[in-house]
Image (tube, rainbow, N blue to C red):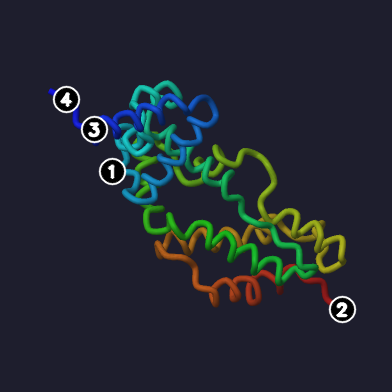
Amino acid sequence: MAADPASTGTASTDDAVKRRRRGAELERALLEAAWQELVEVGFAKLTMESVADRAQTGVAVLYRRWTNKTDLVIAAIRYSGEEHPIAIPDTGDLRTDMIQLLENVNAARAELTRGAMAMFVGLHDDAGLIPADVRQIIRGEGPGRAEEIFRRADQRGEIDLARIPRAVIDMPMELVRHDILMTLKPVPRERIRLIVDDLFLPLVLLGD
């Protein structure tokens, strides 16, 4: 019996995809598939098999790189951050820079907002990781996103970094993260402006 041309064509295409991808290209495809799976179905429903299916590869290919789902999810989160870095504004004004930075962070995290709590619960149940652990694993000990903004503001004479407590410097970003986790929604623009204008700037700006 002759083979079905349509099914033969599909199989050939799938096989060609598997043959073409190697090394870094294959790893990017796997991480992109894992990230999309995480966004669309959430941590609980994501499996190594579902990611492999989305990436059109075998599950053994995943296990050669990541030993379990937790390792894969953390790698996918790191990958997404590296592929879509959050822009650090440089407008020459601390207030405008901070508002734009928080809005950029807010927009970048919007697609995962609804599943954020479930993802962190899943990572905790699977590996005992709390959100701070995940952030530490992904970011390491490097400077925070706003550090360059504060350094430039200090050089312009808007603030004196030497006198500002670390907790105050971290406050705007921490409040945005808190709001996302508490509401499972993107932070409203007016809330971002309140954080910057009513809470942050009065504590850091130098008087005349």
Mark 4 vs 1: CB contact within 8 A: no
Decide which of tag 2 and tag 1 comes sooner along the chain: 1
- The residue under the point 49% across, 60% down is 178
Mark 3 vs 4: CB contact within 8 A: no
- The residue under the point 63% across, 77% down is 198
**Residue of label 1:** 45
Mark 2 vs 1: CB contact within 8 A: no
Query: Which amino acid, mark 2?
Result: Asp
Mark 4 vs 2: CB contact within 8 A: no
* CA–CA distance in space, label 1 to label 3: 35 Å
**Residue of label 4:** 2
Query: Which amino acid, mark 3?
Result: Pro
Tag 1: Cα neighbours inside 10 Å, few (<14), some, or many (≥20)?
Answer: few
Query: Which amino acid, mark 1?
Result: Lys
Decide which of tag 1 and tag 3 comes sooner along the chain: 3
Decide which of tag 4 and tag 1 comes sooner along the chain: 4
* Mark whose residue sits in front, 2 or 1: 1
* CA–CA distance in space, label 3 to label 4: 8 Å
